[in-house]
Image (cartoon, rainbow, N blue to C red):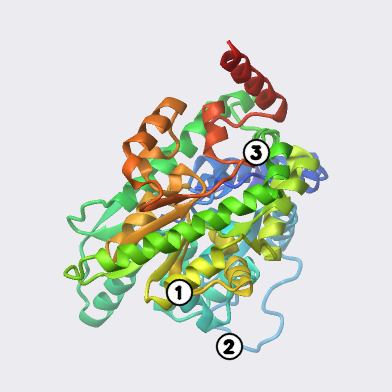
Amino acid sequence: MKFFAQIIVRIFLTNLVLCGFWQSALAQVDFSSLEQLSPDDRKLADSLLTVALDHEALYTLWGDLKPMSDVAMFTFRVARPVSVSSGTASIVDTGNPALQQIRRLQRVVNAMNFGDVQFFIHPFKRADSTKRFLQVAVVRKSSVAACLGRNQSFFGQFGFVSESDPVSVVMATEYEDKYERYRAYGYLYGYPEHAVTFFVEAARHQDSTKEFVKRDFFQIPTWSGKQGHFVYAVPKGYVPTELDSTLYRAASKVLSDYRAIRPTFMNPDSSLRAADLLKAWYAKQTSVKTASHGHYGILWAQSAEAKALYLQAFSLAEERLETALKQRSKKSGKAPAVIVDIDETVLDNSPFNAAAHLASETSISALWRSWEQKGTAKPLPGAVEFLRFADKRGVKVFYISNRSEAAKAATMRNLKDAGFPQIESANILLRDSTSQGEKESRREAVAAKHDVLLLVGDNLGDFSGAMEYKPLEERMNAMLKERSAWGKRFIILPNAMYGQWEDALYDFKQLSRSAQKERQIKVLQELSK
């Protein structure tokens, strides 16, 4: 028992050589398995959770920057001695105290599963004499699913798909060939593509030439220190890109939130009530509503007037696209393209919004995930016809949405079933760990290789970053600056159910339904003066 009273932790820094800001609302999280542990086992769980939160696993527990993180390394003398040949019976004394320690550790780790989070024990393939290394690690299941989907061309060769069990993926990865193992772990640990590729290629070069490839490290701080806990290798002299900076900023926001709440859960002996902290933090997230579900907007969306506006907008879009194709200069060599939003632009989610309006606030996120995966949203009037019109004229279609990468397969299936053209993975650009909901960078990536003739959406953020997540007056001014684009290059569609138009009323704060109602009344009172 003394072994666990003073946990010897070794964070696996040498493995850091990146899939993974968690913005989706949380379903109600069940901590009952932790609460059923004995007092001593609960202390062990708190110790492991403290190590996780204070180091890189914060970005798995508190957000999905890292689909997977290491927590603590344990060493036990239970491995087969190197002098003993394979197949020999009675390799380990079953009365070995280490096995009792492992049983306790496994029991506690088994209880550390809540919501989208799963802790597990990861036995390494390698052994040192009679020592076996067991790593306690943690995954965010939805982030691993998104990672597998985003890198399907790599993980598919091993038989892994988005629906694969995350722990099985990790266990199998440990026994793959070295370079495949490096790349798989790189993706699972949440490192950017450029860092993963650099590390793999550096290893290949070193193995073939025996020359070490010099490198720098991009450091992302954790509570336990400014350096060395969430870090990936980059070429010597590497200049960080906007991708690196965005990742750093997202991590900084998570760390700031953690630093603010941590002192509240300190014990007199300076230990942390980590399980209570997580429970309180998750409860806070489920107590807020992250999308508007005003019933008047939902009812209006069913009206003939609303449908007529869609038909009118897409009819205009066809005319504008035809004109743009005739007038465009082909000197750039870029292929023509249109960019469309998905939700309330080409797909109708009003059935979900109706269910969410009638449901409790804490169940909304679970309802949305279920709706996404169901993939039965109907096309909005005129949307399929317009995009088929574009497709027939050789125009590339890009669907840019803030749906989660974890829902990509279901979203593609939904769009394809609805009859939309060009439903290919490269054309469906969803929210990943670095975009944090902003769409500008994805639009810029499309514009770098295509001549974007038309943008279609239901929210100002579908058209320009200057209009995205801005206060009321700023939004209005930014919209008016684009006066000449509306109805020509920008086609906006009606959505009274939810959107940044309402979020701006609440200063983009996550408010309960009652607090939202108070703010709405205040706005109406001010307007009536």
Q: Mark 3 falls on what kind of element? A: loop
Disc 1 marks which residue?
181
* Residue at x 57%, y 28% (from the top left corner): 261
How far apart are the two marked residues, 2 and 3, measured between alpha carbons?
65 Å
Number of marks: 3
The residue type indicated by label 2 comes to Ser
- CA gap, disc 2 to disc 1? 26 Å
Please provide percent x and percent y for residue 274: 64, 37
Q: Quadrant of the C terminus?
A: top right
Compared to residue 52, the image places residue 314 above or below, namely below
Across and down, in percent, residue 191 comes to 41, 59
- Determine the secondary structure under disc 2: loop
Three-letter code for the amino acid on which mark 1 is drawn:
Arg
Q: Is residue 251 above or below residue 139?
A: above
Q: Quadrant of residue 92?
A: bottom right
Disc sitting over residue 292 in the figure: 3
Q: Residue at x 56, y 43 (%)?
A: 62
Above or below residue 255? Residue 350 is: below
Residue 190 lies, with reference to residue 337, above or below; the image says above
Q: Where in the figure is residue 496, as x and y percent of width and height?
A: 61, 40
Counting residues from the start of the chain, the first of labels 2 and 3 encountered is 2
Q: Where does label 2 land, which residue?
A: 85
Three-letter code for the amino acid on which mark 3 is drawn: Ser
SS for callout 1:
helix
Tell whether 328 sits left or right of 40: left
Residue 366 at x, y = what percent?
72, 51
Q: Earlier in the sequence, mark 3 or mark 1?
A: 1
Residue 453: tell me if it is visible: yes
Q: Which sits earlier in the primary sequence, circle 2 or circle 1?
A: 2
